[in-house]
Image (cartoon, grey):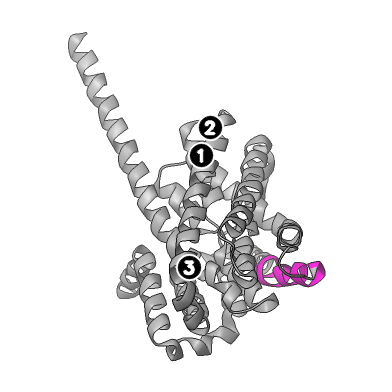
Amino acid sequence: MKAFSLFSNFMTKYMSALVLLIAIIALLQPWTFKWAAQYVTYLLGIVMFGMGMTLRWEDFSLVFKRPRDVFIGSLAHFTIMPALAWGLAKAFGLPPELAVGVILVGTCPSGTSSNVMTFLARGDVALSVAIGIATTVLAPFITPLLTWYLVGAWVSISLGAMFLSIFQVVVVPIALGIVVNRLFGGFVQNAVKVLPLISVLAIMLIVGAVVAVSAQKIIQTGLLIIGIVIIHNLCGYTLGYCAARIAGFDFAKQKAVMFEVGMQNSGLATSLALMHFSAAAAIPGAIFSVWHNISGSLLANRLASKAEDEVKTDISKARKNTINA
């Protein structure tokens, strides 16, 4: 059990590097992960089910206890990222299938990784969780509508079909996870130790599958899409932070909103792209899955170091004041 725990911790700690390695292998040897493409929807469902098992009905009360904070964070998420996605697709003159993929990333709810990054950065984790819950619950309605509105210039989509897809791969698994947590709390407490490993493996397979089936297209447009994904993500962090600051949030809340805006449920974007558009449309989501974990980890570590330095400075000042007194 100890060996398993160490293995799980290793996989979770180095997830970004492992996902990047899988992406490289799938790009150079597509046959290694092509088989997983047909299971992407199920894999995302597993990740969402795991997320649901970590939630309780009481967690939803967070949304209502801090309505202003959650509203501002959710509004920032569903305005900044979609607008950035549309602007980048237009500015770089992307072909329809890639434009759709970038916009899908922008219109999806925040990713579960944002909660982890907020925790590592010593931000307001409760607010991060509440915004994540709110954007996920709203996603079946807002994501199809925003995608339909923004993508209309490139392709036609079915609102009903996309709503049903999000409901099936997000809402149902999360709801089942919550029910299981409610009914089998003791079992869940033990299973929670395994969930991070299962989620990491599922994400690795999703990225590997998408890269494998789109390898040729990635080679042709890779640098452009990677650049757009990086700009999208970094601008999301920056504008999310600015929105929180304008709203008068303290620094802990600013960090939470920054990660909730900048980090997306790119696995959902990837799944929706494969179900409703094309393998090429899934490329931005796959690249975003790799990149936002790397950037999020680096940013969280930087903010955590800054927080430690501030604490040390405060302690030093307090000691000096005590001595002087």
Q: Dot 3 corresponds to which residue?
A: 287
Q: Tell me which amino acid carries mark 1.
A: Tyr
As for residue 168 lying within the magenta part, the answer is yes
Asked which quadrant contains residue 272, the reply is: bottom right
Q: Which mark is residue 241?
A: 1
Residue lying at the far right of the rendered structure = 160
The residue at 57%/37% (across/down) is 243
Above or below residue 291? Residue 256 is above
Mark 2: which amino acid?
A: Arg
| Location of mark 2 (residue) | 245
Q: Residue at x 56, y 68 (%)?
A: 267
Q: Which residues are magenta?
A: 159-173
Q: Are marks 2 and 1 in contact (CB under 8 Å)?
A: yes
In which image quadrant can residue 8 be found?
bottom left
Q: Is residue 163 magenta?
A: yes
Q: Position of residue 17 (x, y in %)?
A: 34, 68
Earlier in the chain: of badge 3 and badge 2, it is 2
Question: Looking at the image, is mark 3 or mark 1 nearer the viewer?
Answer: 3
Q: Mark 3 touching mark 2, by CB under 8 A?
A: no
User: Dot 1: what SS?
Assistant: helix
Question: Is 153 on the left-hand or right-hand side of 325?
Answer: right
Residue lying furthest top in this view?
A: 325
Question: In the rendered view of the protein, which quadrant contains the C terminus?
Answer: top left
Instruction: Give the CA separation, mark 3 to mark 2.
Output: 29 Å
Residue 50 in view in this figure: no
Secondary structure of the residue carrying numbered label 2: helix
Residues packed near mark 3 inside 10 Å, few (<14), some (14 to 19) or many (20 plus): many
